[in-house]
Image (spheres, rainbow, N blue to C red):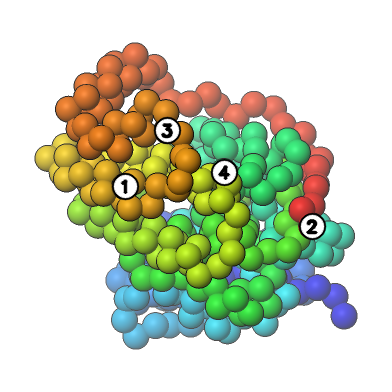
Amino acid sequence: MSLRLSIVVPVHGVEDYLVQCLDSLRASGSASVEIIAVDDASPDSCGDILDRYAGIKVIHLDGNVGLGLARNAGLAQATGDYVWFVDSDDWVPPGSIKAVLDELAASEPDVLLIDHLRAYDDGRREVDASSHLLAGPVTLDRVLGVQHTAWNRIVRRSLLLGHDLQFRPGWYEDVPFSLPVLLAASRIAVLNRVCYYYRIGRAGAITATRSDRHFEAFTQYDRLQEWLAGHHVAPEVRARLFHLMINHLLVVAGNDGRMHPSRRRAFFRQLAASYRRYRPAGYRPGLRHRLVAAGNYPLYSLLRAAYRARAPRSAAPAMAARSSAPTVATIV
């Protein structure tokens, strides 16, 4: 019996992008793939668009539950050996699904990590800052640093069910899912090939919306820390995750598209409290982390302003030429 892949697509308010996403997923035409689209009570025409697609399993939710819980609804209906969570405003390049299926069959991992490009509506494509971690030696320390999202890791369904790894409600729902998935896995493989286009800057996207809901990142990191406390995690891994947590929260704090300037001090204050609460014994902080530990918002603010004044105004470099041949390694 051939290996099967379930692709779960949560859908809400993306009528301008949904067709591109679904067409890219259906392009493989593989009988080994099931596509499960979850209409999260979308207020636009997404529900009607989904119903017009043959060969896609569609779930219509009675009320809006949010991205994470919509993914859970799709996971509950999945029958594949592996599950891939694809966001409905993103899409996959040609050949991606075949490459994923081939690698899953060859490596039989618990988790397969893939590379992606950041895609802008003006046609620009950018390599993610963490993509280089997929090209080097595959170690747990390296793969923990890969952007922690749900869509760049294809996971064995039995791992998710056996460890009760589901999404929690709220924004930043990927945090307490994507990292425990790696820690629970016995076998991790890396497919160093661009298999996903991550859309940047669309109107309505969480990462482009100023809101106090960005404070929910603290709740999600509390959930991650709760998970870590209930499992045997090596001290060096806990220190690595703490470092990543503080860096991520600093990114949120400093992002004008997410954090209103009037709320930045309050966010920083809560960040300092999380730092003191979760700092591992023996952790040696760098300058920015020392400012967080001290709760020194005025100096942080000055350094942030100085950095932004020096930073180039242009976006990150466009995509460099890349080989289409994947390189794969496995952690056992």
245 or 161: nearer the viewer = 245
28 or 251: nearer the viewer = 251
Task: Give the mark toward the camera: 2 or 3.
Answer: 3
- How far apart are the two marked residues, 4 and 1, measured between alpha carbons? 22 Å
Residue 26 visible in the shown view:
no
Looking at the rendered structure, which numbered label has been put on residue 145?
Answer: 4
Looking at the rendered structure, which numbered label has been put on residue 285?
Answer: 3
Element type at mark 2: loop
Residue 187 visible in the shown view:
yes
Q: Which residue is mark 2?
A: 332
Which quadrant, please, contains the C terminus?
bottom right
The amino acid pointed to by label 1 is: Arg
The amino acid pointed to by label 4 is: Gly
| Image spot of residue 104 (x, y percent) | 79, 62
The amino acid pointed to by label 2 is: Val
Looking at the rendered structure, which numbered label has been put on residue 260?
Answer: none
Disc with the residue nearer the chain's start (3 vs 1): 1
Contact between marks 1 and 2 (CB within 8 A): the answer is no
